[in-house]
Image: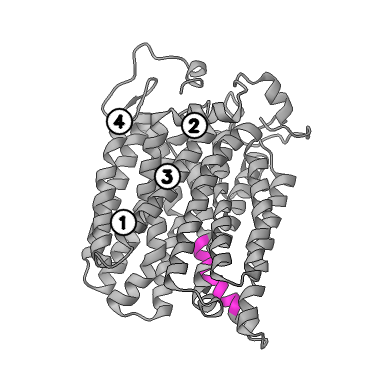
Amino acid sequence: MEPSSPRKPHLSSLPLDSENKATEFHPFSTSPPHMLAFHLAWLSLFSCFFSAFSIPPLIPIMRQNLNLSAADIGAAGTAAFIGSIFSRLAMGPVCDLVGPRIASAALSLITAPIVLATAFISSPTSFILVRFLIGFCLANFVANQFWMSSLFSTSVVGLANGFAAGWANMGAGVAQLTMPLLYSFVKSFNVPENTAWRVIFVVPATFQALTAIMVLIYGQELPCKDSIKVSKISNKPKESFLRLLFNGLMNYRGWILGLIYGCCFGVEMTMDNIVAQYFYYRFGVNLEVAGTIAACFGLTNWFARPLGGIVSDQMAKLFGVRGRLWGLWAVLTVAGLLCVLMGRANSVGGSIGVMCMFSVFVQAASGLTFGIVPFVSKRSLGVISGMTGSGGTVGAVVTQMLLFSGDKFSTQTSISVMGLMMIICTLPISLIYFPQWGGMFCTPNETSIDEEDYSLLV
């Protein structure tokens, strides 16, 4: 799949299936190639989330120095989401063509200088442009999930995807905590305020570039075979970028999963944007406490999203792919109910408690969503991953614009309405049907096609 020079392959210490994909997942192991690739993938994506969310915690300082208006800040946030939407959609077929390792590393190396360019912005226009371009680095998420699906068997792919994305998503929370500390540290050396916040962007830019180089040097694209040998014996049809894109876009399951991901990951991103302000204005807590509460919401990704992958795989062992569908519907519905309840909670303690439960379920739903993605189409796996990932960002934009822009609704009312939207949007899961495995209410086709033919389905 990857047109690179041959390298001596690593031999796996994990049990493998007929495709040399690992049938076990040990997140604290670094054995090559499978577990080493897992750690490289999540760390690389972690650095991209760190870069993408390194600006928001410094906006109060940057706002003064750059004379940013509220409209400028809002436009910059939307621009970052838009950059992520289109880049995630494009990243899917790129992974199909060149492989996730090269796609991931190339994107990180291309966007790292843009992160560094944040130090040189001098106007609202350049601020919006930089945020738009930095948003592209989040397309690394698609390569991350594609890579895990290439290395781990269907029995543990939900677990692998959940851990890889969950640990990586913590980069946003870590950025919220560390960038202000770095700013204070630099300023303690009597560095002017306007210089201090600029200097520290060397950190995320360098971190992102180093992880990309590590992916190129130590990562292995495919299990136990070099890429050229695999490309010679693979039965996967070689198709153009446009053909791969067309095949993916014609698969209705990808559109439904994009909608579902918009209702879990998109909602998660929206909450990351508004939760600190919500507690500050609704309950009168100070900025430090509000920031800590907001960071807690994001840091639960350490276990919540992997938990979704575990649930997906366990449901599959009991009920097959139909179990994955039922598990996703149940978890996302509970998340919607908790979101409704959070908006109606009237005490700070009760609201924090509901928020914590809500964060676990909504992030677990993201893990369950990508427990289904690898089964949609082998032919255009990258495109389906890109469609689903883009759906998450589209969901964030739509939710932000409909419910949290302007003063038509109070924030607590908007949160409850967002929960109702989540519950309603779980219904299309019942429309997903696989000829081999069935759907939520449908059994498999008695004349179901075999695995090889299924890989060619649109």
* Residue 338 appears in view: no
Q: CA distance from mark 1 to mark 3?
A: 16 Å
Q: Nearer the viewer, mark 1 or mark 2?
A: 1
Q: CA distance from mark 1 to mark 2?
A: 38 Å
In this rendering, position of residue 142 left or right of residue 4: left
Pick whichever of labels 1 and 3 is earlier in the sequence: 3
Q: Is residue 288 above or below residue 51?
A: below
Residue 174 is covered by the magenta coloring: yes
User: Dot 1: within a 10 Å radius of its alpha carbon, few (fewer than 14), some, or many (20 or more) residues?
Assistant: few
Circle on res. 321: none
Q: Earlier in the sequence, mark 4 or mark 3?
A: 3
Foreground residue among 12 and 191: 191
Q: State the residue position of label 1.
A: 402
Looking at numbered disc 4 in the image, what kind of residue is underneath it?
Leu
- Gap in angstroms between the C-alphas marked 4 and 3: 17 Å
Image position of 359 (left or right of 229): left
Queried whether the magenta region covers residue 278, the answer comes back as no
- Name the residue tied to disc 3: 391
Q: Which circle marks residue 431 in the picture?
A: 4
Q: Which residue is mark 2?
A: 154
- Disc 2 and disc 4 in contact, CB within 8 angstroms: no
Kindly identify the amino acid type of the residue bearing the numbered disc 2. Answer: Thr
